[in-house]
Protein backbone atom coordinates (compact mmCIF):
# COMPACT_ATOMS: atom_id res chain seq x y z
CA UNK A 1 0.00 0.00 0.00
CA UNK A 2 1.76 3.20 -1.09
CA UNK A 3 2.41 5.90 1.47
CA UNK A 4 0.33 9.01 0.75
CA UNK A 5 2.48 11.76 -0.67
CA UNK A 6 2.52 14.77 1.64
CA UNK A 7 3.95 16.80 -1.23
CA UNK A 8 0.47 16.98 -2.75
CA UNK A 9 -0.77 18.93 0.30
CA UNK A 10 -0.23 22.65 0.76
CA UNK A 11 0.96 23.95 4.12
CA UNK A 12 -2.56 25.23 4.83
CA UNK A 13 -4.02 21.80 4.04
CA UNK A 14 -1.43 19.95 6.09
CA UNK A 15 -1.43 22.16 9.18
CA UNK A 16 -4.83 21.08 10.59
CA UNK A 17 -3.92 17.42 9.98
CA UNK A 18 -0.80 17.29 12.16
CA UNK A 19 -0.98 15.89 15.70
CA UNK A 20 1.51 15.40 18.49
CA UNK A 21 1.54 11.76 19.55
CA UNK A 22 3.18 9.72 22.30
CA UNK A 23 5.06 6.71 20.96
CA UNK A 24 7.84 4.38 21.99
CA UNK A 25 10.96 5.41 20.11
CA UNK A 26 11.49 1.75 19.12
CA UNK A 27 8.31 1.78 17.00
CA UNK A 28 9.76 4.42 14.64
CA UNK A 29 11.41 3.03 11.48
CA UNK A 30 14.87 4.19 12.57
CA UNK A 31 16.63 6.36 15.14
CA UNK A 32 16.84 9.40 12.88
CA UNK A 33 13.25 9.30 11.62
CA UNK A 34 12.29 12.24 13.83
CA UNK A 35 15.55 13.30 15.49
CA UNK A 36 13.92 16.32 17.16
CA UNK A 37 11.17 14.24 18.79
CA UNK A 38 10.88 15.50 22.37
CA UNK A 39 11.90 12.85 24.90
CA UNK A 40 9.21 12.58 27.56
CA UNK A 41 11.13 9.97 29.53
CA UNK A 42 13.36 7.10 28.42
CA UNK A 43 12.05 5.64 25.16
CA UNK A 44 8.77 7.55 25.39
CA UNK A 45 8.80 10.39 22.87
CA UNK A 46 6.43 13.03 21.54
CA UNK A 47 6.34 12.58 17.77
CA UNK A 48 4.61 14.45 14.98
CA UNK A 49 2.09 12.55 12.88
CA UNK A 50 -0.45 13.32 10.19
CA UNK A 51 -4.09 12.39 10.68
CA UNK A 52 -5.75 11.12 7.51
CA UNK A 53 -9.45 10.10 7.52
CA UNK A 54 -8.65 6.37 7.48
CA UNK A 55 -5.15 6.10 8.97
CA UNK A 56 -2.37 7.90 10.82
CA UNK A 57 1.05 8.48 9.26
CA UNK A 58 4.30 9.33 11.05
CA UNK A 59 6.44 11.05 8.40
CA UNK A 60 10.14 11.75 8.49
CA UNK A 61 10.96 15.05 10.13
CA UNK A 62 12.50 16.19 6.85
CA UNK A 63 9.06 16.09 5.22
CA UNK A 64 8.15 19.08 7.40
CA UNK A 65 11.46 20.96 7.33
CA UNK A 66 11.81 20.56 3.54
CA UNK A 67 8.86 22.90 3.15
CA UNK A 68 11.22 25.80 3.57
CA UNK A 69 10.61 26.62 7.22
CA UNK A 70 11.58 25.61 10.73
CA UNK A 71 10.14 22.59 12.52
CA UNK A 72 8.93 24.63 15.48
CA UNK A 73 5.65 25.90 13.96
CA UNK A 74 4.72 22.34 12.96
CA UNK A 75 5.36 21.09 16.50
CA UNK A 76 3.22 23.95 17.83
CA UNK A 77 0.43 23.05 15.39
CA UNK A 78 0.63 19.39 16.40
CA UNK A 79 0.15 20.22 20.07
CA UNK A 80 -2.60 22.74 19.36
CA UNK A 81 -4.53 20.23 17.23
CA UNK A 82 -4.06 17.48 19.80
CA UNK A 83 -5.42 19.71 22.54
CA UNK A 84 -8.39 20.69 20.37
CA UNK A 85 -9.12 17.02 19.73
CA UNK A 86 -8.86 16.20 23.43
CA UNK A 87 -11.35 18.93 24.27
CA UNK A 88 -13.99 17.67 21.83
CA UNK A 89 -13.45 13.95 22.47
CA UNK A 90 -15.97 12.19 24.71
CA UNK A 91 -13.91 10.63 27.50
CA UNK A 92 -15.16 7.54 29.28
CA UNK A 93 -14.04 7.42 32.92
CA UNK A 94 -14.01 4.55 35.37
CA UNK A 95 -12.64 4.37 38.91
CA UNK A 96 -11.33 0.80 39.09
CA UNK A 97 -11.29 -1.05 42.39
CA UNK A 98 -9.16 -4.23 42.15
CA UNK A 99 -10.62 -7.57 43.32
CA UNK A 100 -8.83 -7.37 46.67
CA UNK A 101 -10.64 -4.10 47.43
CA UNK A 102 -7.54 -1.93 47.82
CA UNK A 103 -5.54 0.34 45.54
CA UNK A 104 -8.21 1.92 43.34
CA UNK A 105 -7.15 3.94 40.30
CA UNK A 106 -8.74 5.91 37.47
CA UNK A 107 -8.99 4.82 33.84
CA UNK A 108 -9.81 7.24 31.01
CA UNK A 109 -10.72 5.79 27.61
CA UNK A 110 -12.05 7.03 24.29
CA UNK A 111 -12.37 5.96 20.67
CA UNK A 112 -9.66 8.44 19.65
CA UNK A 113 -6.34 6.82 18.72
CA UNK A 114 -4.76 9.82 20.48
CA UNK A 115 -6.27 9.10 23.91
CA UNK A 116 -2.95 8.06 25.47
CA UNK A 117 -1.32 11.11 23.87
CA UNK A 118 -3.81 13.32 25.71
CA UNK A 119 -1.54 12.62 28.72
CA UNK A 120 0.63 15.45 27.35
CA UNK A 121 -2.16 17.60 28.83
CA UNK A 122 -2.55 15.44 31.95
CA UNK A 123 -3.81 18.19 34.27
CA UNK A 124 -6.62 19.04 31.86
CA UNK A 125 -7.55 15.38 31.29
CA UNK A 126 -7.75 14.84 35.05
CA UNK A 127 -9.91 17.92 35.41
CA UNK A 128 -12.29 16.53 32.81
CA UNK A 129 -13.01 13.57 35.12
CA UNK A 130 -13.06 15.53 38.37
CA UNK A 131 -9.54 14.81 39.64
CA UNK A 132 -6.89 17.29 40.72
CA UNK A 133 -3.19 16.97 41.39
CA UNK A 134 -2.40 17.62 45.07
CA UNK A 135 1.20 18.76 44.90
CA UNK A 136 2.75 15.30 45.12
CA UNK A 137 2.30 14.20 41.54
CA UNK A 138 0.38 11.42 39.84
CA UNK A 139 1.10 7.76 39.06
CA UNK A 140 0.39 7.36 35.34
CA UNK A 141 0.28 4.54 32.76
CA UNK A 142 -0.36 4.81 29.00
CA UNK A 143 -0.41 1.12 28.02
CA UNK A 144 -2.00 1.55 24.59
CA UNK A 145 -3.35 4.28 22.38
CA UNK A 146 -6.96 4.33 23.64
CA UNK A 147 -6.26 4.53 27.37
CA UNK A 148 -4.71 6.47 30.26
CA UNK A 149 -4.68 4.98 33.77
CA UNK A 150 -3.65 7.05 36.77
CA UNK A 151 -3.84 7.60 40.51
CA UNK A 152 -3.38 10.97 42.14
CA UNK A 153 -0.92 10.72 45.04
CA UNK A 154 -3.22 11.80 47.86
CA UNK A 155 -3.30 11.50 51.66
CA UNK A 156 -4.42 7.87 51.62
CA UNK A 157 -0.93 6.41 52.00
CA UNK A 158 -2.38 3.13 53.24
CA UNK A 159 -3.88 2.61 49.78
CA UNK A 160 -1.19 4.07 47.51
CA UNK A 161 1.38 1.20 47.46
CA UNK A 162 -1.41 -1.20 46.47
CA UNK A 163 -2.62 1.26 43.81
CA UNK A 164 0.88 1.40 42.32
CA UNK A 165 1.10 -2.39 42.24
CA UNK A 166 -2.32 -2.77 40.60
CA UNK A 167 -1.62 0.04 38.14
CA UNK A 168 1.54 -1.77 36.99
CA UNK A 169 -0.33 -5.07 36.57
CA UNK A 170 -3.05 -3.24 34.64
CA UNK A 171 -0.50 -1.56 32.35
CA UNK A 172 1.35 -4.82 31.70
CA UNK A 173 -1.90 -6.56 30.73
CA UNK A 174 -3.16 -3.71 28.54
CA UNK A 175 0.17 -3.36 26.75
CA UNK A 176 0.34 -7.09 26.07
CA UNK A 177 -3.26 -7.58 24.93
CA UNK A 178 -4.44 -4.44 23.14
CA UNK A 179 -3.51 -3.22 19.67
CA UNK A 180 -1.55 0.01 19.54
CA UNK A 181 0.64 -0.78 22.53
CA UNK A 182 2.79 2.09 23.82
CA UNK A 183 4.46 1.15 27.11
CA UNK A 184 3.88 -1.34 29.96
CA UNK A 185 5.44 1.01 32.51
CA UNK A 186 4.18 3.29 35.26
CA UNK A 187 5.47 6.83 35.63
CA UNK A 188 5.53 9.39 38.39
CA UNK A 189 4.45 12.66 36.77
CA UNK A 190 4.85 15.93 38.64
CA UNK A 191 5.02 19.50 37.31
CA UNK A 192 5.10 18.17 33.75
CA UNK A 193 8.15 16.01 34.45
CA UNK A 194 7.90 12.23 33.94
CA UNK A 195 9.95 9.65 35.84
CA UNK A 196 9.74 5.93 35.07
CA UNK A 197 9.37 3.90 38.27
CA UNK A 198 8.94 0.36 36.91
CA UNK A 199 11.38 -1.97 35.15
CA UNK A 200 11.17 -5.14 33.10
CA UNK A 201 14.11 -7.52 33.02
CA UNK A 202 13.02 -10.47 30.91
CA UNK A 203 9.99 -11.88 32.73
CA UNK A 204 10.87 -10.07 35.94
CA UNK A 205 8.82 -6.95 36.66
CA UNK A 206 9.99 -4.62 39.42
CA UNK A 207 8.93 -1.31 40.94
CA UNK A 208 11.73 1.08 41.89
CA UNK A 209 10.90 4.14 43.97
CA UNK A 210 13.41 6.60 45.33
CA UNK A 211 13.37 7.95 48.88
CA UNK A 212 11.22 10.96 48.01
CA UNK A 213 8.51 8.95 46.26
CA UNK A 214 8.63 6.26 48.94
CA UNK A 215 7.85 8.95 51.50
CA UNK A 216 4.93 10.27 49.46
CA UNK A 217 3.55 6.73 49.10
CA UNK A 218 3.91 6.03 52.83
CA UNK A 219 6.56 3.37 52.31
CA UNK A 220 9.28 4.85 54.55
CA UNK A 221 9.93 3.29 57.90
CA UNK A 222 9.62 5.45 60.99
Image: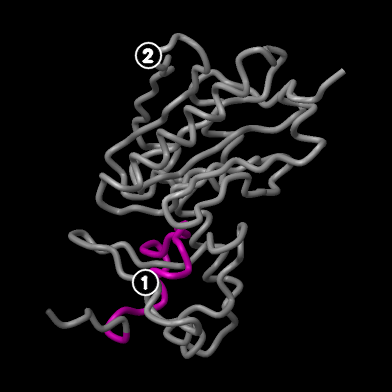
Secondary structure of residue under mark 2: loop
Residue 219 lies, with reference to residue 202, above or below; the image says: above
Q: Dot 2: few (<14), some (14–19), or many (≥20) neighbours within 10 Å?
A: few
Residue 198 lies, with reference to residue 214, above or below; the image says: below
| Camera-nearest label, 1 or 2 | 2
Q: Indicate which disc residue 58 carries.
A: 1
Q: Residue at x 44, y 52 (%)?
A: 183
Q: Position of residue 83 (x, y in %)?
A: 49, 46
User: Which corner quadrant holds the N terminus?
Assistant: bottom left
Q: Position of residue 152 (x, y in %)?
A: 62, 25
Residue underneath mark 2: 99
Q: Residue at x 56, y 29 (%)?
A: 164
Q: Position of residue 94 (x, y in %)?
A: 39, 20
Q: Give 7 or 38, whichever is nearer the viewer.
A: 38
Secondary structure of residue under mark 1: loop
Q: Position of residue 111 (x, y in %)?
A: 27, 39
Residue 61 lies, with reference to residue 215, above or below; the image says: below
Q: Quadrant of residue 21?
A: bottom left
Farthest residue in the top direction? 101
* Magenta stretch, residue numbers: 7-27
Left or right of 140, for residue 92: left
Q: Give 149 or 169, whichever is nearer the viewer.
A: 169
Amino acid sequence: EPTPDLDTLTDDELRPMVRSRILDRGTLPDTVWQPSAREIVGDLVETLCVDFPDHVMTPKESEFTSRGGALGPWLDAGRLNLRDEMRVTALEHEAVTPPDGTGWFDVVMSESVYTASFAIFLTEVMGRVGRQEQGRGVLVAVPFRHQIAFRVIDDDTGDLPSALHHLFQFALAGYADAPGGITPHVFWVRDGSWRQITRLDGDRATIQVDEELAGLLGLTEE
